[in-house]
Image: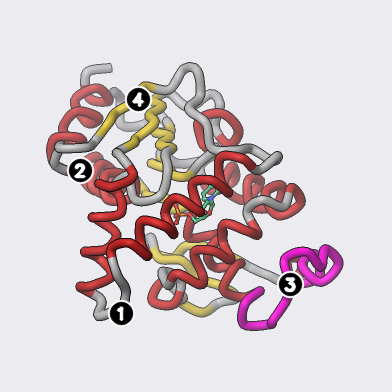
Amino acid sequence: MSNKEVFQIAIDGPSGAGKSTVAKAVARRLGIEYIDTGAMYRALGLKLLERGVAMDDEEAVRKVLAETEIDFRAGSIFLDGQAVEHLIRTPEVSMAASACSALPFVREKLVALQQQLGARKSVVMDGRDICAVVFPGARFKYFITASDEERAKRRYRELLEKGEQTTFDEVLAAIRARDHNDMTRAASPLVKAADAEEIDTTGMSIDQVTDYICDQVCSR
Ligand code: DC
């Protein structure tokens, strides 16, 4: 692959499947940028939570959205000029992100932003609708999955490391609830795009998945 060619690596999949860890590792190895689209929905979810806006109050959500600036600086998410990575991984923000991501006018704005971010430079972008909606013309498309127990195990470990008080059963229930929201919403539900390659990471290491994707990119 020539260094000058701009290309996108699109990675979709359910929460906790390891997509962001793999996407980050692939970006680092190939020397291209990583864009975490879930962090964009999370940043908006955080702002809506902080403002006490109900997700079904369309007018209020539209108003907040119109006054919201989301960008990435050196790979980190910024909300209205503030670094918010450390605030957006809580269970409350996860649910708020899932709820606001179901609103078509929210998706419209964030998808347009994602398309701008990936248009001029090569990127690895992960999310739920990257292969089908954001970059249907992406050169490389993957759907990364793992069993729900495996995903809950990984998320539970992460939360414990961060010192969060939770139980495995709570994490598993939250993952299932979020999968249900993400797969059954009317606007761009989580589905594998017909032309995306499915990689089931249950029992695979991050390095194995990263090697697999990087080998494919480098050999084309
Ligand atoms: O990948 P994540 O768990 O950080 O994503 C947070 C929420 O945002 C998730 O519930 C689904 C939603 N999302 C989406 O609808 N579309 C994307 N491209 C990325 C995330």
Where 134 sits versus 46, above or below? above
Q: Nearer the viewer, residue 172 or 193?
A: 172
Left/right of residue 75 with respect to residue 168 in the rendered view: right
Image quadrant containing the C terminus: top left
Find disc 1 in the rendering and name its residue. 165
Number of the front mark, 3 or 2: 3
Image spot of residue 65 (x, y percent): 73, 66
Closer to the chain start, of discs 1 and 3, is: 3
The residue that mark 2 highlights is 29
Between label 1 and label 4, give the one nearer the viewer.
1
How crowded pointer 1 is (Cα within 10 Å; few <14, some 14-19, many 20+) is rated as: few
Left or right side of 71 for 197: left
What segment carries the magenta color? Answer: 48-64
Amino acid type assigned to the residue bearing label 4 in the image? Glu
What is the distance, in whole Å, between disc 4 and disc 2 at their CAs?
A: 21 Å
Task: Tell me the residue that label 3 is attached to.
Answer: 54
| Label 4–label 2 contact, CB within 8 A | no
Q: CA distance from mark 1 to mark 4?
A: 33 Å
Dominant SS of magenta comes to helix
Q: Earlier in the sequence, mark 4 or mark 2?
A: 2
Point out which mark residue 198 bears. Answer: 4
Sequence-wise first label, 1 or 4: 1
Residue 90 in the image: state x and y as whole percent. 42, 72
Q: Residue at x 20, y 73 (%)?
A: 161
Instruction: Pick whichever of labels 1 and 2 is earlier in the sequence.
Output: 2
Does 120 appear in magenta?
Answer: no
Asked whether, in this view, residue 3 is left or right of residue 179, the answer is left
Does residue 191 sit above or below 110 in this rendering?
A: above
Q: Earlier in the sequence, mark 4 or mark 3?
A: 3
Spatial CA distance of label 1 from label 3 is 26 Å
Name the element at disc 4: strand
| Whether label 3 touches label 2, CB < 8 Å | no
